[in-house]
Amino acid sequence: MTLFIDGDAFPNLLKPIVVKAIERLKLKTYVIANKKINVGKSKYIEYLIVDAGADEADHKIVEMTVENDLVITADIPLADRIISKNAHAIDHRGELYSVENIKQYLTIRNFMQEMRDAGEVTGGPKAFGQKDAQNFANQFNAFLQKALK
């Protein structure tokens, strides 16, 4: 299994959690973004900078991902593409996307986008905090433990 990190808006609170797991499990990891992102130092992490442009990092992640890989992303359309490749996706708050739930998340995301496009002020997600980081750590570690048996 390879780990991919969508570098766009990756929360600082998650960086030590992820690097610790990468080191402990010797997990090959790619951090992909269209600008320099530093998650941490590890011989298991490779940083890839893609061309600027909407979804360039997403396209690269999808291109490189194979079955059973894990992608950390808050981008629901990207998660949908990853799930369709029989790989796994988890968001920054610890939500593990799956075949069973990804279409529901995508529908809600698209509905909210339509509302914003129509001029509705939706407020966006609540601020990312320590509880979110803890939820992520719990789900991430449980997933890795199960996947790497």
Image (cartoon, helix red, strand yellow):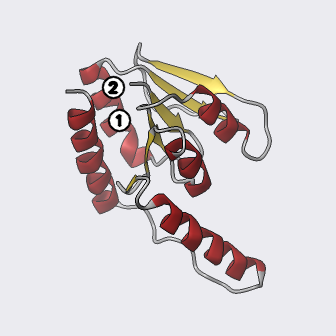
Residue 103 drawn at (x, y percent):
52, 63
Q: Which residue does the numbered mark 2 point to in the structure image?
A: 22
Task: Give the residue at x 23% y 49%.
Answer: 138
Which residue is most to the bottom? Answer: 120
Task: Give the residue at x 44% y 52%.
Answer: 91
Q: Which residue does the numbered mark 1 point to in the structure image?
A: 18
Q: Is residue 34 left or right of residue 65?
A: right
Q: On residue 134, which mark appears? A: none
Relative height, residue 44 to residue 19 (above, below): above
Relative height, residue 78 to residue 29 (above, below): below
Q: Quadrant of the C terminus?
A: top left
Q: Is residue 4 left or right of residue 27?
A: right
* Front position in the image: 75 or 45: 75
Residue 38 drawn at (x, y percent):
52, 31
* Front position in the image: 57 or 81: 81
Query: SS at mark 2?
Result: helix
Residue 49 drawn at (x, y percent):
67, 27
Q: Is residue 129 left or right of residue 30?
A: left
**Amino acid tagged 2:** Ile
Task: Give the residue at x 77% y 84%.
Answer: 118
* Front position in the image: 14 or 81: 81
Query: SS at mark 1?
Result: helix
Crowd tier of the residue under label 1, counting other residues whose Cα lies within 10 Å: few below 14, some 14–19, many 20 or above: many
Residue 22 figure quarter:
top left
Q: Quadrant of the N terminus?
A: top left
Residue 141 figure quarter:
top left
Residue 95 figure quarter:
bottom left
Task: Give the residue at x 56% y 39%.
Answer: 7
**Amino acid tagged 1:** Val
Residue 94 drawn at (x, y percent):
35, 54
